[in-house]
Amino acid sequence: MTANTPDAYRHDLEVVRDTAKQVIKDFGMAGIEINFSGNPKTAYQELVDQTLPALKNLYQKNAGAFMALLYRIDVEEYKVRKLSDTASGTSFFSQLAAMVIEREFMKVLIRKLFSSRNG
């Protein structure tokens, strides 16, 4: 594993905290409160546990806001469509929550690796 692979940053405290902040910000713009304890060891599961019901609830109550949130997070629409073809119910939302957290992580990581202050 090299320093430039995403896995090398999964336990990087700064990246974990910034990912949580990004999730909180994006979901907050949709009126959804997400909390983070600050514990990097439980961060991923904390965020998935909160985003799963939030995504499901938003989808059921306001499909337009649901799609806007996914667009804001930059989850690729074809991936959501593919997921909806292969999973349903709780499985769909569970996998979607993981996809959302992964995308937020990658956004933070890309900013970290390619920001002008690090270059």
Image: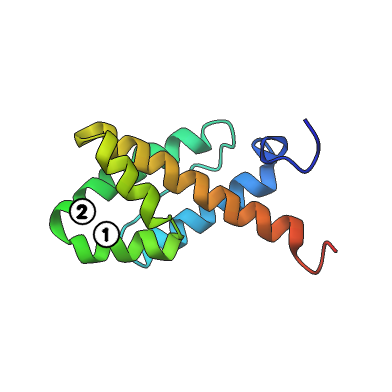
Amino acid bearing label 1: Phe
Q: Position of residue 69 (x, y in %)?
A: 35, 62
Secondary element at image label 2: helix
Q: Quadrant of the C terminus?
A: bottom right
Count of picture labels = 2
Q: Circle 2: is it few (<14), some (14-19), or many (20+) Cα within 10 Å? A: some
Neighbourhood count class around disc 1 (C-alpha, 10 Å): few under 14, some 14–19, many 20 upward: some
Q: Which residue is mark 2?
A: 59
Residue depicted at x 28% and y 34%:
86
x and y, in percent, of residue 70 in the image: 37, 58
Spatial CA distance of label 1 from label 2 is: 5 Å
Q: Nearer the viewer, residue 60 or 31?
A: 60
Specify the farthest residue to the right. Answer: 119
Which residue occupies the foreground of this view, 88 or 28?
88
Q: Which residue lies at the image location 61% right of the left edge and 44% below the top edge?
A: 16
Q: Which residue is mark 1?
A: 66
Residue 83 occupies quadrant: top left
Q: Are marks 1 and 2 in contact (CB under 8 Å)?
A: yes
Q: Which mark is residue 87?
A: none
